[in-house]
Image: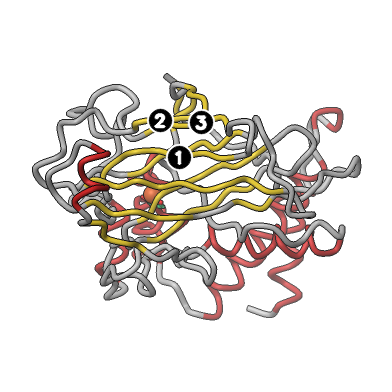
Amino acid sequence: MERKQIEQLAEKFIKGKIDYPEKVNPRVQEITLRLLTDLMQAINDLHITADEYWAGVEYFADLGKEAGLLSPGLGLDHFMDLMIEEDLQAAGLDGGTVRTIEGPLYVAGAPVEKGFARLDDGTDLENGTVLFMQGTVYDEAGKPIPNAQVEVWHANSLGNYSFFDESQSEFNLRRTIITDENGNYGFRSIVPLGYSVPDDGMVKKLLDALGRHGHRPAHIHFFASAEGYRKVTTQINIDGDEYLWDDFAFASREGLVPEVKMVDDAAQLKEKGLDKAYASIDFDFHLVKDIDKPVQGSEVERRRAQL
Ligand code: DHB
Ligand code: FE
């Protein structure tokens, strides 16, 4: 089919039959027209057969709630980060801690603690290595920000997240930490294992057909924010993980792989009440002042689990 004909058809399907003009959302209309045109063009160019087309429709029908997992696997979460960064840069809001994807496994409403929190419920110590992570939230001038909010969430030693993994206790490995008067935060937890997409799921099905794995390197998620500053969505990766630069979600970034120090010094172990070496990570957050102009990327609206 000729391009002109495809464009005319898409135009007709989307704009040729408007029964309720007062209900039209022009933005939805514009996006639908563009996506439909591009889809029909692809069907034409690749000669997608009817069998293949219906397999695709059925894939989406079965995908359902897994759509939020397909998006990172196709690199689209990371792509949206790059788009956000373009907008931030254009608005002079670049700099600060590098952002990376939120992922689909955040749960709102985690317990709030001042300065320091213990994230794990103590049930994962057989497999897990104890982790202490600490740092400071700074402004652009390098001044610590007291009362900044550090929201942290991560997987357990099997790569599973509480809430989605119902075998874990409520809010296990999830906390909101408010920085102390010196802008410091700290927490005790366990070193996570990288998450993998469910074996029996629809995302795995597509990844298999693409010859790709569905593993993420071990990582810890953060939202860091403070009054008057732009919220940053980011993660740190655990250095040494075999998937460190082979993330199925393409979310590993320079600047987000802090050194992991193993501490086995007797005095320090005693102080922490531990009998085995623990991991220690230092990581600071750098926030950028907000401006009045609306620029996407600070508070991203999306459906999130809530407890
Ligand atoms: C997915 C899981 C994660 O833990 C994450 O950080 C990003 C993506 C996923 O299931 O697609
Ligand atoms: Fe994750």
Whichever of callouts 3 and 1 sits on the residue coming sooner in the sequence is 3
Quadrant assignment, res 217: bottom left
- Disc 1 residue type (three-letter): Gly
Which residue is under mark 2? 117
Q: Percent from the top left, x then y, of residue 263? A: 26, 57
Looking at the rendered structure, the secondary structure element under dot 2 is strand
Q: Dots 3 and 1: beta carbons under 8 Å?
A: yes
| Structure colour scheme | secondary structure
Name the residue at the front extreme. 267
| Residue at (81% x, 56% y) in the render | 93
Q: Percent from the top left, x then y, of residue 240? A: 29, 70
Q: Nearer the viewer, residue 164 or 194?
A: 194
| 90 in relation to 169, above or below | below
Which label was assigned to residue 186?
1
- Disc 2 residue type (three-letter): Ala
Which label was assigned to residue 115?
3
Q: Dots 1 and 2: beta carbons under 8 Å?
A: yes
Q: Nearer the viewer, residue 295 or 184?
A: 184
- In screen coordinates, is 295 left or right of 292? left
Looking at the rendered structure, the secondary structure element under dot 3 is loop
Determine crowd level at label 2: few under 14, some 14-19, many 20+ residues with C-alpha closer than 10 A: some
Q: Nearer the viewer, residue 261 or 101?
A: 261
Q: Nearer the viewer, residue 21 or 278?
A: 278
Name the residue at the left extreme. 126
